[in-house]
Amino acid sequence: MKKYLLLLLIIISSCSKEELDDYIEPPNPNPIPQTIYPTSVQNHEWNDGWYSRDRESYPVEFFSAFEYFDYDLDGDLDIFCRVGFYPGQGDSNAANTNNDIRIIINNNNTWTLADRDIVDIQPNRAYRKIVTVDIDNDGDLDMIGFNAEDPAEFNGYRTMGGLDLFRFNDGKFYFEEIIPYQEGNPTFFHSGTAADINNDGWVDLIAGTGKMILNNGDGTFQNSSYDLVLGNSGGMDWYSQAAIDLNNDGYTDIIAGKSHDDGEWFFPMGGTEELYGKTQWVYWGKAEYPYFDMDNPLILPTNYDFFGTEDLISKGLSSTMDISIVDFNKDNLLDIFVLSHSPINPPYGDGSSSQLNLIEYYKNNGDNTFTNETWNIFGTDGENELPNSGTNYWKVRDIDNDGDLEILLEVEEYPFTHFKKGSTGQYYKTK
């Protein structure tokens, strides 16, 4: 034993200080594997997480408000979500109740609930959308919760909303209220997004129908906000949005998914037949306030445009619920996918909740225009349509590393989980 100890001392003494330092200071065993992007749409779309209840088992039910992030830095993306209900409790109204915020830890596709005290839980909220973004430029992801409580009998038909921040520090998420939870349509934030709006290097927020909340430059937010949509919105609320530089001019652009249901309130609020069913709009960014050109939007041409026909109301799109941004055809230009709904009434719906959901693809032409190439990638036999689907969210990623992007449905239960590219070059539904 003494000989071995003496040999070890000789080896150590023969090393230079630099060599010894290299030996006793191994590399960090827990590097952050998740790339943190400057916009919330990139953080969701461009990392590999995918929620699919048909493919995996989760310890809680969740759907309408969730986001992927690597909490434990192990390379597997975990989930920050608003719980719908716990097993054994019975179901609840997913849009209005049981807003328990939890983290589900992913360990090689085995999912467990993290400790409750990791998140500063706020009861009696109605989180409809959660996004991830680095609010304070400290190198980790914070969570933004957009609230929208639908009017119903159990809550006295009130319309509640607000905007919350869960700031991540020292392994926990600490709650901060950005816009107080209150009654009224102006704070009914069905969706939202985050990006640097005014090019100052700090992430700002867009909530609901164009409410802008600017970062103070220190990870906090200005007491006052401003509205992009001034006065009458023309009967079209924003039910989804993404903010990113689409045309590489250095300014953030907005892609807004609008909603007008079946026209019941669309026309009384100033909506026109020509605009009915056109629910995908692009607003180009600019240098000066209000940082977007609201007078010259680009309305993306849907294949489901029934203007001038008797089918306008019964078949025209009623809302666009989610937007994916990705360079789909690998030409270094960002393309747009949208997930839209038809009305719930016949012929596409059953009059209660079932409806036709559909996907459309817009190729970026590089000149501030887009071409609808849905039929080119899906064919014309309705492969892009999802009848009687509850799908509200989705993303586009290469999940099997074959070099082709898959179109992934983030849905509770449906006969198909994603679209895959076939030998003909077109996409088909598959498990």
Image (cartoon, rainbow, N blue to C red):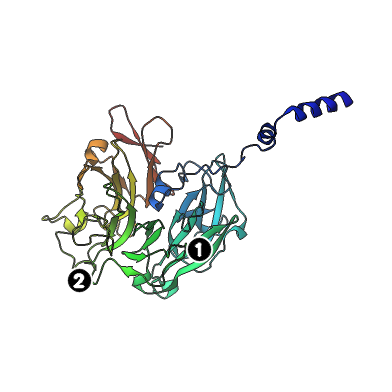
- The image's mark for residue 426 is none
Query: How crowded is the residue under tag 1: few (<14 C-alpha within 10 Å), some, or many (20+)?
Result: many
Camera-nearest residue between 190 and 249: 249
Which quarter of the rendering shows the C terminus? top left
- Earlier in the chain: of badge 1 and badge 2, it is 1
Question: Does 215 sit above or below residue 247?
Answer: below
What is the quadrant of residue 110 in the picture? Answer: top right
Count of labels in the image: 2
* Residue, disc 2: 268
Instruction: Give percent across and percent down for residue 225.
Output: 36, 70
Classify mark 2: helix, strand or loop: loop
Camera-nearest residue between 280 and 265: 280
For the view shown, which residue lies furthest in the right direction? 2
Instruction: Give percent across and percent down for residue 176.
Output: 51, 67
- The image's mark for residue 99 is 1
What is the quadrant of residue 419 in the picture? Answer: top left
Question: Does 158 sit above or below residue 118?
Answer: below
Residue found 48% across the figure and 65% down from its top: 97
Classify mark 1: helix, strand or loop: loop
Q: CA distance from mark 1 to mark 2?
A: 34 Å
Instruction: Give percent across and percent down for residue 72.
Output: 58, 47
Q: Amino acid at mark 1?
A: Asn
Which quarter of the rendering shows the N terminus? top right
Whether the residues at callouts 1 and 2 have beta carbons within 8 Å, the answer is no
Q: Residue 70 vs residue 417: left or right?
A: right
Instruction: Give percent across and percent down for residue 89.
Output: 56, 59
Q: Residue 74 vs residue 346: left or right?
A: right
What is the quadrant of residue 3 in the picture? Answer: top right
Q: Can I make out residue 1 in this image?
A: no
